[in-house]
Image: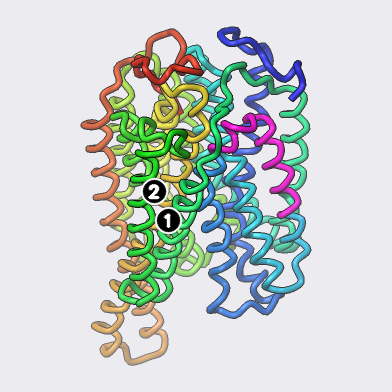
Amino acid sequence: MSETAVKAPGVPDASRWKALVFIALAQLMVVLDATIVNIALPSAQQDLGISDGNRQWVVTAYALAFGGLLLFGGRIADLWGRKRTFVLGLAGFAAASALGGAATNEAMMFGSRALQGVFGALLAPAALSLLAVMFTDAKERAKAFGIYGAIAGGGGAVGLILGGFLTEYLDWRWTFFVNIPFAVIAAAGAWFVIREPEGGRNRSPLDIPGVILSTLGLVALVYGFTRAESDGWSDSVTVAMFVASAVLLAAFVFVESRVKAPLLPLRVLTERNRGGVYLSLGLAIIAMFGLFLFLTYYLQVVKGYSPVRTGFAFLPMIAGMITGSTQIGTRLMTRVAPRLLMGPGFLVAAVGMLLLTQLEIGSSYAALLLPSMLLLGLGMGTAFMPAMSLSTQGVEPRDAGVASAMVNTSQQVGGAIGTALLNTIAASATTSYITDHIGSATSPSQQQLVQLEGLVQGYTSAIWFAVGILVLAAAIALTFVNAGRPNMGAAIGAGEGAEDEVPVPVVAH
């Protein structure tokens, strides 16, 4: 890296706010990609002749590579330098997106999605750890993480709108090509603007056994939940994946406790506040991912909305998230303990979710969906922002990448669990409702009504579970997270040799 790319420790980087623009742009691209492809999937499936049995691999290939390689990506960022890893991740993501947009068969499509996941796993931890090491003043950190948190939370819904527009008015291929300008602008901006602090590199040799065990363990876990969704929880491959994951991850923890330079230093996990953040954030994502899925289907299948109209229907949630993150979270983060934002935030989101348990076929958007989405967005935005900040709080700079990777890992695994678990609950509730009621439906129109009622019954049954999960996330945040109000000093450890210090807990991403 050039001399100009490094700044002295303890001196605020003059270009940090410009850098935030490019980091936020990259984060938006990664989050968009999680939902934008879902909207385009039916069109892409038809064009490329992908079978119903194989279509899940468009989503699964990305999730497996991204979720499985995140810890490795986080450590690469600590080793190589976060700026270099960030730019490489962007370049690779753009190339993989170009390959996906140009796909002529299913193998090319699946390969491009896996490659997007690989480069996303480099990009996401590098982006978050750059913020962690560049913004060390508590007040500035609150603002920076507020912006980042709003994008991380609201980007998925923006993806639904953009995906709807591109698919409806252009072509599904543009849901891939749209990543290229994002990546080029973010990479060019980052290369010229970002100056990484000195002393933040981790020069330790790479823990190869840790890389192999964590990657295989996480891939097995994510794939297990994906299989459960499509083939059932008792399927022999599903069970084998869960067993393999448990064995591999247990072996990973054992290895990490023994090796001199671990991939994931256990001190990152065992600190009470970070452990509470990873757990509560993962649970909240389980609830949110399932909800995105159900609301999309409810609006399109039950209410007959077009893809574009469905995307716009999610706007109140985006508005709520941005308000919760940048106005409530940012303003209060330096004044109150993080748990007093996270716990109530998750509970407000749970109230929004509770409203959705009243969904019926004829439910009014303005009377039911609008207020519930606003509450969900406000609650999640308020909670996410201090959670993200606290997750790298007090971490030595040399561990910032891997600590950031743990946030992304809890989100990825939470997303896989949420989709599989809540989908299974919804599907079984729908099946039993239809079985019980279809006999009394004599005409085709009555049978269709029973089918739709069954779908809504399934959604509301699963949403009840999501309410419970959010309440549990709030309880964990309120009991585990015991960091006090952030001090106004540095929010990150002092670099090499800092592991023996006991840092003052400060809210971080």
Q: What are the residue bounds of the magenta stretch?
A: 74-96
Please rate how many residues cluster around mark 1, counting C-alpha atoms within 10 Å: few if below 14, some from 14 to 19, many from 20.
Answer: many
* Residue 217 - label: 1
Asked whether the beta carbons under mark 1 and mark 2 sit within 8 Å of each other, the answer is yes
The kind of residue on which mark 2 rests is Phe
Q: Quadrant of residue 176?
A: bottom right
In this rendering, position of residue 480 left or right of residue 418? left
Q: Quadrant of residue 385?
A: top left
Q: Is-magenta flag for residue 320? A: no
In this rendering, position of residue 288 left or right of residue 137? left
Does residue 233 lie above or below 504 as drawn?
below
Tell me if residue 453 can be seen.
no
Tell me if residue 83 can be seen.
yes
In this rendering, position of residue 17 left or right of residue 69? right
Does residue 159 lie above or below 100 as drawn?
above
Return the residue at label 2: 252
467 or 114: nearer the viewer: 114
Query: What SS does tag 2 mark?
Result: helix
Q: Quadrant of residue 388?
A: top left
Q: Residue at x 28, y 28 (%)?
A: 481
Q: Residue at x 31, y 33 (%)?
A: 270
